[in-house]
């Protein structure tokens, strides 16, 4: 739970966990998604906070490893392979956070939605270099809105525009994106050199 002192760490064995900021007034903002191999809560794991920063919820059916913090820190100091994989995972998390911040900082709703799909394709797409990219995580309109920092009503309007333009298609919560058409209407290069999405990372972080 948000702002609680954890008793242990968790490593995702299966499924997706959503990190959100839940305010006292009940407003919820998506921060990021944690996938197989991720450690939660990260900041507490590395002793950078004394409590959890965010709320965690299962975004899909999940199975988790339970790890004592002392065991985790011992692996970091004594197991170079584990430490390298954790560093690689942390760098990917930083890339994910930077791309998400870029979405939230866009000045208008049209840009926020366009860059939200750019971000989701690069992080969770079937292959970031494909012309037609299928986002591998299922999203509702409300979840797209939460990720973009918009209302559901505004998101619905903008999604309809993207569908009419042939940039986005939708099938049973899974979005596909025509990256050539998306690239033609954004100000930045669609892919700055990301060869594979975050879901293709080596997930075997826990050594036994």
Image (cartoon, grey):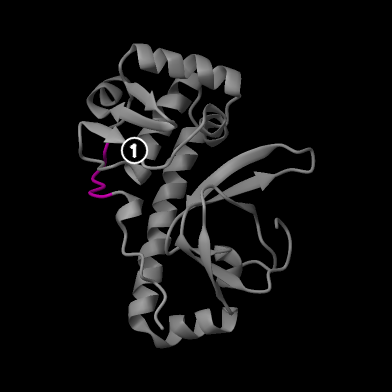
Query: Is residue 39 placed above or below 103 in the rendered structure?
Result: below
Q: Is residue 179 visible?
A: yes
- Tell me which residue sits at (42%, 62%) in the image: 90
User: Which residue is most to the bottom?
Assistant: 78
Seen at 59% across and 23% down, the residue is 152
- Looking at the image, residue 35 lies above or below residue 160: below
Label count reads 1
Residue 44 in percent (x, y) is at 61, 68
Secondary structure at numbered mark 1: helix
Q: Quadrant of the N terminus?
A: bottom right
Residue density around tag 1, few if under 14, some if 14–19, many if 20 or more, within 10 Å: many
**Residue 190 in sight here:** no
Is the C terminus in the top left, top right, bottom left or bottom right quadrant? bottom left
Read off the residue under disc 1.
121
Q: Is residue 208 left or right of residue 47?
A: left
Residue 89 picture location, percent across and down: 39, 63
For this orientation, the residue located farthest to the right is 24
Q: Quadrant of residue 47?
A: bottom right
Q: Nearer the viewer, residue 150 or 37?
A: 37
Q: Is residue 22 above or below residue 172?
A: below
Q: Is residue 71 magenta?
A: no
Q: Indicate whether 67 appears above or below 149.
A: below
Residue pictured at 28% horizontal, 42% vertical: 126
Expressed as whole percent of the image width and height from the top left, the position of residue 84 reads: 34, 73
Measured as percent of width and height from the top left, residue 81 is found at: 33, 79
Q: Quadrant of residue 13?
A: bottom left
Q: Main secondary structure of the magenta part?
A: loop
Q: Which residue occupies the foreground of this view, 172 or 36?
A: 172
Q: Which residues are magenta?
A: 190-196
Is residue 192 covered in magenta? yes
């Amino acid at each position: 739970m948000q702002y609680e002192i954890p008793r242990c760490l968790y490593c995702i064995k299966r499924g997706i966990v959503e990190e959100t900021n839940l305010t006292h007034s009940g407003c919820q903002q998506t921060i990021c998604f944690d996938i197989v191999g991720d450690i939660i809560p990260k900041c507490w794991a590395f002793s950078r906070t004394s409590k959890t920063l965010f709320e965690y919820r299962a975004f899909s059916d999940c199975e988790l490893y339970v790890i004592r913090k002392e065991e985790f820190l011992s692996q970091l100091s004594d197991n170079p392979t584990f430490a390298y994989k954790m560093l690689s995972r942390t760098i990917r998390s930083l890339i994910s956070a930077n791309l998400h911040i870029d979405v939230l900082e866009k000045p208008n709703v049209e840009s926020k939605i366009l860059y939200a799909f750019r971000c989701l394709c690069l992080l969770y797409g079937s292959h970031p270099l494909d012309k037609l990219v299928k986002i591998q995580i299922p999203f509702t309109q409300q979840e797209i809105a939460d990720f973009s920092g918009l209302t559901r009503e505004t998101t619905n309007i903008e999604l309809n525009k993207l569908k009419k333009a042939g940039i986005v298609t939708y099938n049973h919560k899974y979005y596909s994106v025509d990256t050539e058409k998306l690239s033609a209407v954004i100000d930045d290069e669609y892919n700055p050199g990301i060869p594979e999405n975050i879901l293709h990372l080596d997930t075997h972080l826990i050594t036994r």
